[in-house]
Amino acid sequence: MSISTKSEISNSKSQIGIIVDAGPTIGYGHAVRCLRLASALIGETAVIFYPLSESCREFLLAAGSHGKFEIGKPQLENNALPPLVITDLREAHGITADIRRNGSRHISIHDLGLAQCQSDVVIDGSVTTIFPYAPDEHRSLFVGPQYMITRETVARKRPTETVLVTLGGGSTSNFAQKVSEEVWKTGLTPITTRGFIGSAPMTDAEFASAMATCCFAISGSGVTLYDLLASGVPTIAVGFDRLQLRTADAFHERGAVLSAGAIDRLSSGALVRACMEMLDNRSLVQRLSETGRMLVDGKGLSRVVEIVRRQLWLTSQVKTFSVC
């Protein structure tokens, strides 16, 4: 998109609505990537969040979003949607029809082919799919990990004798203590997303520092796994459900991670063996790091921003033609 078109969009007082859900059960990755996208669009358009649950609204407020973006109440008022609406929902909803009735253009963000809907634009940054997308000449489709919205990559430094244990929020974080106890057995020091055992939660800067200096990471297979791979962090991936397990196995098959399987069936011996392989096999670690960065290059956010800019431009053209 040209600079002149970007300027035209930013001067048109355009708005984007983002409909998202998050919480202890479905996780917070949906809200995290929507916040990243919204932050990248500051200065170009106003963003209104429409959280579908109180837990999602509380997460957005806790993330310091209030003031930067408008955050609505969980009760969605479909008759007042902006001209461009982005949805990031794990389950199928009737919202697609409401967006269409409102006359808005619709960008839908998905994982694994889930919650497919008849949106104008589909973005799915997963490394694998469960339900392949059917060809549709009326929709634009962008699929693959090159479209995953990741955090800004961090430069790897000389590794310390630490292991980053990042197993998500909510109920999944309960496994961090169990995994950390196994890491201690290898002579390494586990750092969880709550800091060293018993400390306060990590800040974003502390998390970036841990990514830069850890020997390797042990991660769930949600959005954070893509963050780690984009920064070249060698990672042992675990799955908390069958969907995450598919992601871990897909990256394992491509040589980007070691998959330790399902967390609820993970034996202490298997985890220790995987940790020791990370310590002893330098060629493996290097290969994991290089392959991970090849599959997830960290430029997904910029690619999605360009897609959104294009759709903003199209909505402005529709508005212009309708007036004429």
Image (cartoon, grey):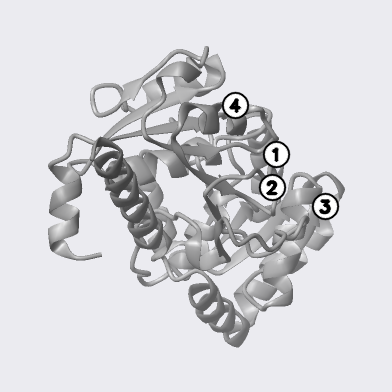
Q: Are marks 2 and 1 in contact (CB under 8 Å)?
A: yes
Residue 37 image position (x, y, % from top left): 37, 46
Whole-number angstrom distance, CA of label 2 to CA of label 1? 6 Å
Residue 300: quarter of image: bottom left
Which one is in front, 281 or 74? 74
- Name the residue tied to disc 3: 266
Q: Is residue 65 above or below residue 85?
A: above
Give the number of the mark in front: 4 or 3: 4
Which element is circle 1 on?
helix
- Name the residue tied to disc 4: 23
- Name the residue tied to disc 2: 179
Q: Residues within 10 Å of mark 3 (few under 14, many from 20)?
A: some
Q: How crowded is mark 1: few (under 14 residues within 10 Å), some or many (20 or more)?
A: some
Q: Is residue 316 above or below residue 269?
A: above
What amino acid type is highlighted by mark number 1? Phe
Q: What's the residue at 53%, 28% (across, down)?
A: 101
Q: Earlier in the sequence, mark 2 or mark 3?
A: 2
Q: What's the residue at 56%, 79% (across, down)?
A: 291
Q: Which of marks 3 and 1 is nearer the N terminus?
A: 1
Give the number of the mark in front: 1 or 4: 4
Q: Earlier in the sequence, mark 2 or mark 4?
A: 4
Whole-number angstrom distance, CA of label 4 to CA of label 3? 25 Å
Q: How crowded is mark 4: few (under 14 residues within 10 Å), some or many (20 or more)?
A: some
Give the number of the mark in front: 2 or 3: 3
Whole-number angstrom distance, CA of label 2 to CA of label 4? 23 Å
What amino acid type is highlighted by mark number 3? Leu
Q: What's the residue at 63%, 45% (across, down)?
A: 118
**Seen in the image, is 323 located left or right of residue 30?**
left
